[in-house]
Image (cartoon, rainbow, N blue to C red):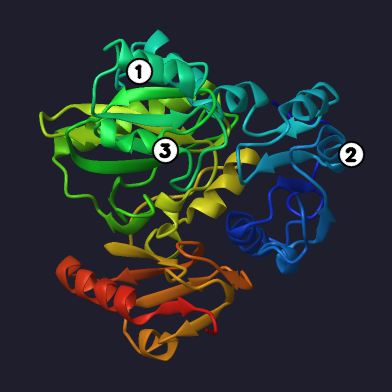
Amino acid sequence: MSNKKKLHFPNDYKVGVLGGGQLGKMLALAAGKWGLPFYVLDASKDFPAGAYSTEFTEGSFKDFDDVYNFGKDKDIVTIEIEHVNTDALFKLQEEGVQVHPNPQALNIIKDKGLQKQFYADRALPTSPFRLYANEDELKLSIKDNRLIFPFVQKTRTAGYDGRGVAVIRSADDMDKILKGPCITEPLVDIDKEIAIVVARNASGEITTFPPVEMDFNPVANLVEYLYCPADISYNVLTKADELAREIIEAYDICGLLAVEFFLTKQGEILINEVAPRTHNSGHHTIDSCQTSQFEQQLRAILNLPLGSTTMTSPAIMVNLLGEAGHTGPAIYEGMDKCLQTEGVHVHLYGKKITKPFRKMGHATVVDTDLAKAKEKATFIKNTLRIISEE
């Protein structure tokens, strides 16, 4: 995993990122601390990372030629989304470009069926699952009583931010069944959903951020609140941390891996799914940890010493979502009241158009008193409305 040429940190490195959304923007801001040349590929320079990159290339991260031509003069190529053209990444890797995370892991992770089988093959704890070629095969399985209600259906590819997931509780929900190749899992009796962001560099050093607890919006199936530290026992914390470390090593990933777990009411810890990049469950680290997840990704892919993940304060993150019923140029209503609140850090992604439940930003509330932080987070959620003109 050594560099293809001798480089002098930081100004001789050329880091290319596939994806120019909010994760790319926040990664670019972290790179700016070191004056690190930062290059981005995505469809439009109007995307959040456009104004913060050294150079922005307009193209598709799903297209072989676009990815290959973008990456061939870079020292390192990384991602902000896993649904990229991995054939081009394999070719770049063969030609000496460092690719993090490795494309072998990406091919597994971006297919939920392969990802689940990866855990099953290694006896890593996860929910039982079944694979289906399409929705017709799934419906036939229901008809033959081989698949029993309730269950969760997930499309095998292209799912993120609540997309590609359907909860089918009874025959009344049959119209919710998603099309295409998919997996099903029993509806787990969940007590909590927690996540750990783990980092690994090429030297094999591994660090984990403190576990977070996630509270989901029931309509959009998106994280609405995130609490850190998570309200879990020491035994659960230790087991989840051990699993996160084991998983990133199993995938042989350099960079970050966000690992989402179900904690059942029976006390089991089950791997839900992973994301091989910076993740919504780590946004609070910008304001509440010694090292942010974005700086940690850069440290990991550059094979630098990983930073301390010690918390400087308890934190609650609130996802700032587009208001239901509003689509158009974004208007941020109530921002002044939020900025007057002590301990509140607002991060807007710079998206010009708001849509219902679209992630437009996040706010992190830091406070030594977690109860007070929860009060402030609720205030932010109720006060900062992202709307458009009627």
Residue on which the image places disc 1: 129
Point out the tag, 2 or 1, that comes first from the N-terminus.
Answer: 2
Q: Which residue is rendered at x = 36% and y = 89% of the image?
A: 337
**Count of labels in the image:** 3
| Residue extending furthest toward the left | 266
Q: Is residue 48 above or below residue 221?
A: below
In the image, is residue 177 above or below residue 334?
above
Task: Locate residue 106 relative to residue 45 in the image: left or right.
Answer: left
Question: Do the numbered discs 3 and 2 sit on residues whose CB atoms are within 8 Å?
Answer: no
Q: Position of residue 83 (x, y in %)?
A: 63, 36
Circle 1: residue type: Phe
Q: Distance between the Cα atoms at labels 3 and 2?
A: 34 Å
> Can you tell which mark lies on residue 158?
none
Q: Quadrant of residue 169?
A: top left
Residue type at numbered disc 3: Val
* Pointer 3 with pointer 1, Cβ within 8 A: no
Tell me which numbered mark, 3 or 2, is placed earlier along the sequence.
2
Whether residue 259 is visible, yes or no, is: no
Look at the numbered disc 3 and give the secondary structure of its residue. Answer: strand
Mark 3 and mark 1 lie on one chain; the one further toward the N terminus is 1
Q: Which residue is mark 3?
A: 165
Label 2 secondary element = helix
Q: Residue at x 77, y 53 (%)?
A: 43
| Cα–Cα span, label 2 and label 1 | 39 Å
Q: Residue at x 53, y 36 (%)?
A: 276
| SS at mark 1 in the image | loop
Q: Which residue is tagged 2?
A: 69
